[in-house]
Amino acid sequence: MKFEHPSNATLLNPDETIGMIPDLLNQSELNEWEAANILKAERWLFLTSHHSKDILTIDFIKLLHKKMFDETWKWAGQFRSSEKNIGVSPYKITTALHDLLEDVVHQILNNCFSPDEIAYRFHHRLVSIHPFANGNGRHSRLMTDLLLTYMGQPRFTWDEKNLGKEGPVRKQYIDSLREADKHNYAALALFVRS
């Protein structure tokens, strides 16, 4: 199967591509398969009771990724072992996630920012760490939405159906993340509620 990716997408290496579980013919079939897998995970996530102290853990981050991609990739829920076009070095993933989760717990307990700001900053850092071989954007958006619900806030209004496709919505999303890399969160704040 030939993999097709929108620009700025994380590319899989050959070892990662052989981890595909279903026998699919093209990228369109893979996209549909992953979408169905993610929908099951989303139902599980929002219809199952999770304790707030459990969701901000490395184990939960891995569990959610596994639930999202367990019917698609053998390595679902496992941190990547290869370098990518984005993210920390693989050996730094656990430490970077630990620091992120500790920071978010502190921000929530001490009302350091509004719930929306805590959430979009969390999203940005989780994407920047890029813990998995693939699915990081979709995973971090779902984790962020869960965080928002635990803070008593509505989920962000991501334009999910368009973020995986080349076009103006994806470009706006990527551009807002790049601005956040420079500690300018204004564009991301607007995007998540647009």
Image: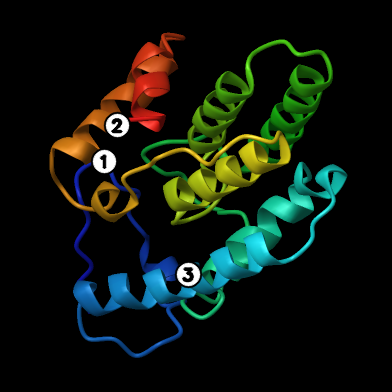
State yes or no: discs 1 and 2 in contact (Cβ < 8 Å): yes
Say whether disc 1 or disc 2 marks the residue closer to the N-terminus. 1
Instruction: State the image coordinates of residue 91 (x, y, percent, origin top left).
Output: 65, 41
- The x and y percentages for residue 100 are 69, 28
Residue positioned 44% across, 67% down in the render: 16
131 or 165, nearer to the observer: 165
Residue at x 53%, y 33% (from the top left corner): 123
Q: What is the distance, in whole Å, between disc 2 and disc 3 at their CAs?
A: 23 Å
Disc with the residue nearer the chain's start (2 vs 3): 3
Local crowd at mark 3 within 10 Å, few (<14), some, or many (≥20)? some
Between the residue at mark 3 and the residue at mark 1, the CA separation in whole angstroms equals 24 Å
The residue depicted at 52 percent of the width and 52 percent of the height is 139
Alpha carbon distance from label 1 to label 2: 8 Å
Quarter of the N terminus within the rendering: bottom left
Q: Is residue 185 above or below residue 132?
A: above
Q: Which residue is mark 1?
A: 8
Give the amino acid at mark 2: Ile
Q: Which residue is mark 3?
A: 39
Name above or below for residue 104 compared with residue 134: above
Q: Is residue 37 visible?
A: yes
Q: Percent position (x, y) of residue 111?
A: 76, 13
Mark 1 lies on a secondary structure that is: loop
Q: Residues within 10 Å of mark 1 (few under 14, many from 20)?
A: few
Q: Amino acid at mark 3?
A: Leu
Q: Which three-letter amino acid code belongs to the residue tagged 1?
A: Asn
User: Closer to us: mark 2 or mark 3?
Assistant: 3
Circle nearer the N terminus (3, 1): 1
| Residue beneath disc 2 | 174
Q: Left or right: where does residue 180 sit relative to residue 28? A: right
